[in-house]
Image: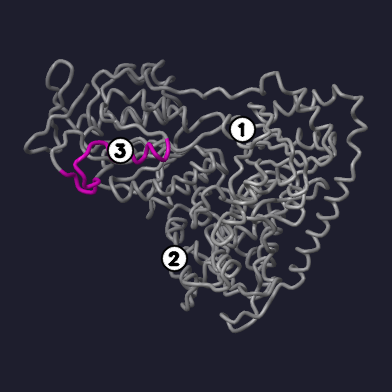
Amino acid sequence: MLKPLPKSTPSAEGRSNQGRGGTILISFAKIKQERAVRAQALAAAGSLDAAIDSGAIKKFTDLTLSEALVLGLLKQGVRNYLTVLGHGSTEVGEVLRVYAQAGLVRVCGVRSEIEASHAAAALRWIYGEKAAVVTSIGPGALQALAASIVPASDGIGVWYLFGDETTEDEGMNMQQIPKQEQGLFLRICATMGQAYSLHTPLALPTALERGLLTVDHPYRPGPFFLLMPMNTQASLLKGFNLDELPCGTPPGVGAAVEGQYKQAANQLLAAKKVVVKIGGGARGAGKEILELIEMVNGVVVHNPIASGIVPYHHPRNMTVGGSKGSISGNYAMENADLLLAVGTRAVCQSDSSRTGYPNVKTVININADPAAALHYRKTIALVGDAALTLRNLIGAIKGYPEKSEIVNSSWYQQCSEKRKEWDAHKAERYTHPVLYDECWGREVLTQPAAIKTATDWARENDVVTLFDAGDVQANGFQIAEDDRIGRTYTETGASYMGFAASALLAAALAKDRPYALAISGDGSFTMNPQILIDGVEHKARGCILLLDNRRMAAISGLQLAQYGSEFVTKDSVQVDYAAWARSVQGMHAFGPIYSLQSLQTALNEAKTYDGLSLIHVPVYFGTDELGGLGAFGRWNVGSWCESTQALRHQIGL
């Protein structure tokens, strides 16, 4: 183990480290020079293995723990870093400076660890590019930890590099948890996900391997927290074998093993009313889902996160279902007698707090996670990759040609009528785009009308749309008409306010700098407005569509529905958000906007601007039903808990 030895007067020229054979004098000037040469050689070679093979970099080399860490992450394809550096991450920051100058990594210094986490999650989720979040010790790390609930909930692999207290326990370190106990940050992080402390520098390869298995997990990736004690970051690894740095991709899972396909096929063909509920784990299985529902006369209902896996306008798509579902989606769930769940964790809002299927007698659950596959009772669990398992299930159904006449119910026609009812319900709101609002003292746009205009525009212009949490999110996933996966992203796993605007920074890091539209409420935006500065600084191309009802409307609406009164979820402060945006040099701003035509014009103009724009749209909130799309399911919250829980136990699914 390499363990730093403190000196009474540290200098920039060097210090002593305890090595295997005694004392090693570290010359930081020499380290700095060798690090720069190594980075240039690596950039010229194109990869670490190529640099070692050519002799440009020695296989056994002297380098600090922090440089070995950055090299190890680079070997795993991590080239993007979102940072809020502090005294707990100075050495890692210096390594990143040198490697950024060599063109090996991209480093974005931002103003909030929460923003950094959201941008890193969005970069991996939307654009498929890996990223690491770097913070100092204490409050900064805890902010990023709070935001890491997004990748933890949505299954997104993100690296987190947190500064931590020193390993020699010389006394309280500034910003550590003020308690006489060891490893407290490690314990907190390990509760949220997988975590490792670089207490022992030569354990780095193990730490990197565990991180690789977490952030690149084949079916349930998530955040990995690597804690960096302040005194080990600059520790010298003498003669470190660079071949120890792990790389590769964990193998994916195959189809569910043989055993229950025939039983599942038999149940599907015998059922009269089949509903297929799809979640995020069904990505890549759209073709198989469409083939299967035709064979069993079934219909599809999707979770918000799965919009576009089955095209919105497909006649068997009953759209979103759950606590904030649709008329057609919830009808299919309420009346089905068999549920085929594909790649869904059955989050409370997606299945009305486990009351969404009161008439289901049999569940067939396809999921790579055994726990998710066995969530419901009366389940035939098929644990494996969604697409591969569905193909085998389709093959099993084809093996029952004599039972094809069983699937002749009127189920599809009944659901189709409800889908028409849902489409008419939405159309009525689109034809009444403005309502008088007492708060604004004038007619303003409704959220359904504004979101419909924006999402239609985004689809026509091939723009990715991000929905922030709250009322915008709920209306958004009901309105979205995605013809393919990847049109819209709604962070419903953690429902983290401020995600959408922060995620625009990911577009600045993505290789082709795509254009993105973040639709955010005033409540969400004011929680994370740093994008106004950081978006300009890092040359993000995109637009914030800020729908302002001067309140947290999702909660105001819930209070009114449950108790008939709203409380402390609104304010009396009017904000000129366009003026706020214009105060940041480089921002382009529009508003306030009061008509759909003006909104369309603003979106078109924003798209032509090579930078970040903000469009401020005051929107309606009130009791007029035309102001929103409504809710058609149950939810185990507030005054509804007793009845919802009683129904759940009565159903017993």
Say which mark, if any, is on residue 92. 3
579, above or below 244, in the image = below
Residue drawn at the location 29% of the way across and 31% of the way down: 198
Of tags 2 and 1, the one toward the viewer is: 1
Q: Amino acid at mark 1?
A: Leu
Of tags 2 and 3, the one toward the viewer is: 3
Q: CA distance from mark 2 to mark 1?
A: 54 Å
Residue 540 visible at all: no
User: Label 1's element?
Assistant: loop
Q: Badge 3 local density, few (<14 within 10 Å), some, or many (20+)?
A: many
In the picture as drawn, the residue positioned furthest to the left comes out as: 8
Q: 537 or 525, which is in the foreground?
A: 525
Say which mark, if any, is on residue 374. 1
Q: Amino acid at mark 3?
A: Val
Whichever of labels 2 and 3 marks the residue nearer the N terminus, that label is 3
Residue drawn at the location 37% of the way across and 18% of the way down: 244
Residue 27: x and y in percent read 17, 30
Residue range in magenta is: 172-193
User: Label 2's element?
Assistant: loop
Residue 410 visible at all: yes
- For the residues bearing labels 2 and 3, Cβ distance under 8 angstroms: no
Q: Badge 1 local density, few (<14 within 10 Å), some, or many (20+)?
A: some
Q: CA distance from mark 3 to mark 1?
A: 43 Å
**Residue labelled with disc 2:** 585
619, above or below 127, in the image = below
